[in-house]
Image (cartoon, rainbow, N blue to C red):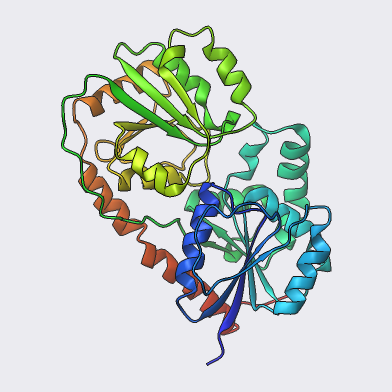
Amino acid sequence: MKKNKVIFLISKLSAGGAERVFAALINNLSKMKYEISLIVVNNSKLHYKLDNSVNIYNLNTNLLLAPIKIRRKLNLIKPDIVVSTVSFFNIYISLIRCILPKNIVYIARESNILKLLNKDESFLKGFVLGTLLSKLFYKNGFNLFIAQTDAMKLEMNSFSNIELEKIRVIGNPFVDNQIKIKPKNEISKIKLLSIGRLHPQKGYFRIFKALEMLDIDFEYLIIGKGPLEKKLKNYLSTSNIRNKIIFSEIISNEKVKEIMVNYDMLLLGSHHEGFPNVVLEATNCNLPTISFKCNNCLNGVVLDGLNGYITHSNKLEDFNDNIKKVINNQYDIVEGKNFLNEKFNLNKIVNSYDELFSDISKSRIKQY
């Protein structure tokens, strides 16, 4: 039986949440009835191990020169389906769609809330790419779209005018690695953790301001790099918590898990997210999450009293009160893990992609 050819297309396979999900999907779909290929535009280090059956093509180029190389590779492989991900890269693909082969179904997997990106980016990246081009080109650049939540689907419809029938909702997978739960010892000095790029979207300043008011001894590790690093360190230079904060560069996913199991809670300050992958990973490592309210992305992912707490008021003192609830063991991480594993089970998510691809192969969805 001839295998359907599916290409996953990405600008770079760096250590991000969207990239991590892409790698998990590629590895599992490669074991099914598909011939899977990965095209990476930038020949950066692949942070995630891929199955040996996956064909990997590093174009080793920049976005200016990439269109011709992408077209050549698609003409050579002749895929049935192409899936791209990450918001701005999806918009980029929609712009060059006119020069790409026509007899392919193109799918955009959305990773963020486009209308909210404007608040955190430069004028060029925020307004021109995030608003203007997404409204003019995005919806016509793809046959189908994948939203991670129902809220994201509605936003894509209202903001980018994408027809609801062209959008499938498929969440991100929860992978239960059966990590042993640490015994709950009395906490004298709490160990706090955040993982994410140093970017205005991630809300580090409001975490700092909350921790400046916290009357409990702590240490706080931040894993990530980004354009906000200098401003964050400048702020901390005169803060009363400057000696409690440690910055670490991006590390491997396996190393992240090793760190998570030895920390007491994950702090999430994001103003908006597409889907909080780090919460699923933290829950899998028995690490509760304390977060501020973050558009609607945390609903059904951070479960109050189970795998953490959402600070619905966004007040700094309430954020600290939630930290104290975790210290007092007012949560049930096992129940939270069971719930997320049922809702975002890896096999369930992979089967949803399989169903989508099968619908396409059966010509249930009209191609361009």
| Residue at 77% from the left image edge and 44% from the top image edge | 132
Tell me if residue 152 comes above or below residue 240 in the rendering.
below
| Residue at 61% from the left image edge and 52% from the top image edge | 45
Q: Is residue 312 left or right of residue 61?
A: left
Q: Quadrant of the C terminus?
A: bottom right
Give whichever of 363, 331 is nearer the camera.
331
Give whichever of 111, 260 is nearer the camera.
260
| Residue at 30% from the left image edge and 45% from the top image edge | 285
Residue 103 in view here: no
* Displayed quadrant of residue 194: top left
| Residue lying at the far bottom of the rendered structure | 1
Q: Position of residue 9 (x, y in %)?
A: 65, 62
Tell me if residue 87 comes above or below residue 261 in the rendering.
below
Tell me if residue 55 comes above or below residue 301 in the rendering.
below
Q: Position of residue 106 (x, y in %)?
A: 67, 68
Tell me if residue 143 comes above or below residue 151 in the rendering.
below
Q: Position of residue 13 (x, y in %)?
A: 59, 54
Residue 336 in view here: yes
Q: Position of residue 236 (x, y in %)?
A: 52, 13
| Residue at 62% from the left image edge and 21% from the top image edge | 230
What is the total number of numbered labels drawn onto the structure image?
0
Give whichever of 6, 73 is nearer the camera.
73
* Displayed quadrant of residue 237: top right
